[in-house]
Image: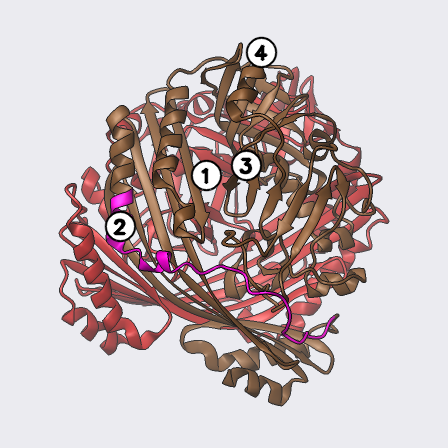
Amino acid sequence: MKAFVTEALRRVTADYAEVRWEGVTRTRIAFQRDQLMALESSNESGGIVRALIDGAWGIAIFTDPDEIPEKLEEAANLAQVSAKHVTDRIRLATVEPVEDIVTVALAEDFRELPLEEKRKLVQHYNELILGYSEEIVSTNVRYTDSVRRVVFANTEGTYIEQEIPDITLLLAAVARRNGDIQQAFTSLGEAAGYEFVKDREEKALEVARRAVELLSAKPVKGGRYTVVLDQELAGVFIHEAFGHICEADFLLRNEPMRRVMQLGKRFGVEALNVVEEGYIPGRRGNTPYDDEGVRRRKVYLIKEGVLVGLMQSRATAAATGMEPTGNARAVSWEHEPIVRMRNTYIEPGEHSFEELLTGIDYGIYAVGAFGGQTEFEQFTFSAAYAYEIRGGEIGEMLRDVVLTGNVFETLRNIEMLGNDFELKGGAGGCGKDGQSPLPVTDGAPHVRIRDVIVGGR
Amino acid sequence: MEILQRAAAVAKEAELYEEFREGISVSFRGGELEKVKSEAVLGRALRVIVDGKLGFASTAGEEEESLVGAAISSAKHGDPAPFSFPRLEGGEPVQVLDPEVQKLSPDELLYWGTEAVRAVKEEFPEIIVDVSLYKGESTVRIANTAGGEREERRSYLGMFVEAQHVKEGDIWLLWVGRNVRKRSDLSPEELTARVIQYLRWGERVVPAPGGKPPVLFTPRGAIVLYLPLLVGFSGLSVHLGTSPLRGKLGEEVFDRRLTIVDRGTLPFGPRSSSFDDEGLPTGSLPLVEEGVVRNFYYDLRAAVLAGVEPTGNGIKGGLFGGGFRSPPTPGPRNVLVSPGDGTLEELIAEMTEGIIVEGVLGLGQGNVQSGAFSNNVSTGFVVKDGKVIGRLKNTMIAGNAYEVLNCALKAIGSEAEWCYGFYKSPPLLVEGISVVTR
């Protein structure tokens, strides 16, 4: 592959060009109630080439590896068409060419295990949940493992081969009482071996128990509350509400947004530090080299409450006079790299969980995450479940808790950070511009925020 | 179809699905062209039944040699197949291929994009405009050992315009878009005009009324109410008991003015096709008739489990599609909601004080199956004395879709529009939804 790709790149006429060819090996197992909905171990491959001519991109996506030279030419032709229409030309920040091979060593390599063994484990979890109670009517238990083998080469002499492992387990229970339907789940993901999904019986039972408990939980009453977020939800908050607006592609050709996201501006309280990191052993967001062949850099987004960094691709770095950070990621060979998060977290503070609850007359302790979404300053995130906080103590269980707000105000309204930091990768992933689900990791300690709007009836 | 023969040598039954997608897309960022992209992607999926057990595998690229082995191995460890592959026959061809789409050149797409940017910028020079356009064809071929082979070429064409209003302390992102199969069903001018209309409505931020004011869902905003239904009408959800509609067939569950049909055979419907992803003819399936639940949609598996006939709704990836990699599950085709009376303007004129919901955040992130929704209104407007007076911010709506569509529906508008590429709905005026605002 190397000689073929290198030769094709040598022949193409473009200011810059790159080839990414990927092979993916993937296992998927899914149960819903008594139905084995998926059982699959498949291989696929495909490629994408990009060419930059006069500051405009041409891109081609394909599945026939023999066509790499033709597709490079096609991308160059499309870039020519594109260049005629562009005045604000895209430039790429300079990076040193790299030659490297990154292989993966997994403690218990899932690639070597028979499908049968994986199926048995998933079925076991499924049966545990189903058998928990008469009120559990269905389940959604899903397992995936994959290794993405990426070959990346460009006209600047970079040639990288890397393997990216991923393993996930989703355990979900659906409970029903009369007309009411509630679900509970736990969602786990890491860049790890099979050991990661073993011995999760406790989690499965916990999910089943919670689904049944939610049938008796009170729907939250809409309003403004002081909320305490658990580590998982605080992680989703920092990812959704703040992380996305630190992706510098939003600032390309967008002068007003650059003014809003000016480095040096105060965004939060003194105690707030937010980090974006490309490699933490075992984590899902790990990106040794990004999909532009740029080596990872750790980026502080917020230091002591002040905006100090953004996530960059080569194009955004050049446009803003910054260094590329290794954040240009593609979800698969069917997509070009765009600026994405990797492992994003709020650094821990000093307070115990009890201290966070102290002094809250009536508030909400929101736990776990259904998900979240952002449109610049507006964000929402949904708690998997929640509890009342009454007089500084945890009270009754609540459901349907969706929190929303303006990120700039909310960051300023952070009152306390816990000392109980946790990192978590879910079974899903992040979505942006039609590229989903991208493996990421979020992290945070418990966080207390005042004046959060909660939707509800 | 040599793969099918190889599979059939080992498996009693086999089905091969092939999808070839070939198209062009262009994207503008910040008012300027950013990239032109081509794609030519061939994907395959194979289902087999070996010793009565079902197996599945998919592939793309140079790995196709592994497909047969992977599917057989899956079957070896699989569960008994609840169904047999059907003979591929019946149904009328549906119009899904428009030569006019094929003829469109990248230059024409670029022209539409440039014009959209120009039109928005002319009236709102400070607005940041992103546009994406795409077009192409997908060819789907299905063959199985029961006999018969089906093949269809389907056009697709789409355009999205996104406008960003960015000011310190007030950032607003608005988009409109459309997916079609027929060139003449896409009007770039109309989409752009819609963006401009919303920008005019939204120039000023005004406080939204709290409590339970009337809420007017535009066709796109109505996704908040339809999403739980689209999950709930899945024959699989009904069979598994995760749908509140289980046991409700023939019952009046919705407002009598509500009639919803899923029509896979609609000429040039964005999700129309002559056959579903299992090769069965698509059809026209009444879901709700005057408030009464009439049908659920089924693929082969769910139909057998429920003891009913499949409805031609086996879609790879179900509701949102998933391409060749996903096994089929029940999903809607073109969901058509019957219009009532009153244009959007007339419905607005009827409101003394209320809000309009066009776009929300957090769609599907919650207990969707139960019908519960709780969303931040990302694009919404405030109505006072029958007139739009501005844009709302920091506002959440919450309720239950099943309750709203049963007892809170005040009016169904007359003008239906395609949204999200799979449903066509008029605007809906409802009451009793909780609105929380600052």
Q: Main secondary structure of the magenta part?
A: loop
Q: Mark 1 points at which residue?
A: A239
Label 1 CA crowd tier, 10 Å (few <14, some 14–19, many 20+)? many
State the image coordinates of residue A43 (x, y, percent, origin top left).
Answer: 48, 73
Q: Tag 1: residue type? A: His
Q: Give the range drawn in magenta.
A: B83-112
Label 2 CA crowd tier, 10 Å (few <14, some 14–19, many 20+)? few
Q: Tag 4: residue type? A: Thr
Is B381 left or right of B405, judged from the image as shown? left
Depth check: give the residue in front, A442 or B202: B202
Instruction: Look at chain B in the picture and name its colour.
Output: brown
Dot 3: element: loop
- Of badges 1 and 2, nearer the viewer stands 2
**Does label 2 lie on the same chain as label 1?**
no
Q: How far apart are marks 1 and 2 (CA)?
A: 38 Å
Q: Tag 3: residue type? A: Ala
Q: Which chain carries label 2?
A: B
Q: Which residue is drawn at 67% across and 32% down?
A: A400
Q: Name the residue under label 2.
A: B108
Label 4 CA crowd tier, 10 Å (few <14, some 14–19, many 20+)? few
Dot 2: element: helix
Depth check: give the residue in front, B30 or A16: B30
Q: The red chain is which one?
A: A
Q: Can residue B96 be seen in this view?
A: yes
Label 3 CA crowd tier, 10 Å (few <14, some 14–19, many 20+)? many
Q: Mark 3 points at which residue?
A: B416
Q: Do the residues labelled 3 and 4 touch (CB within 8 Å)?
A: no
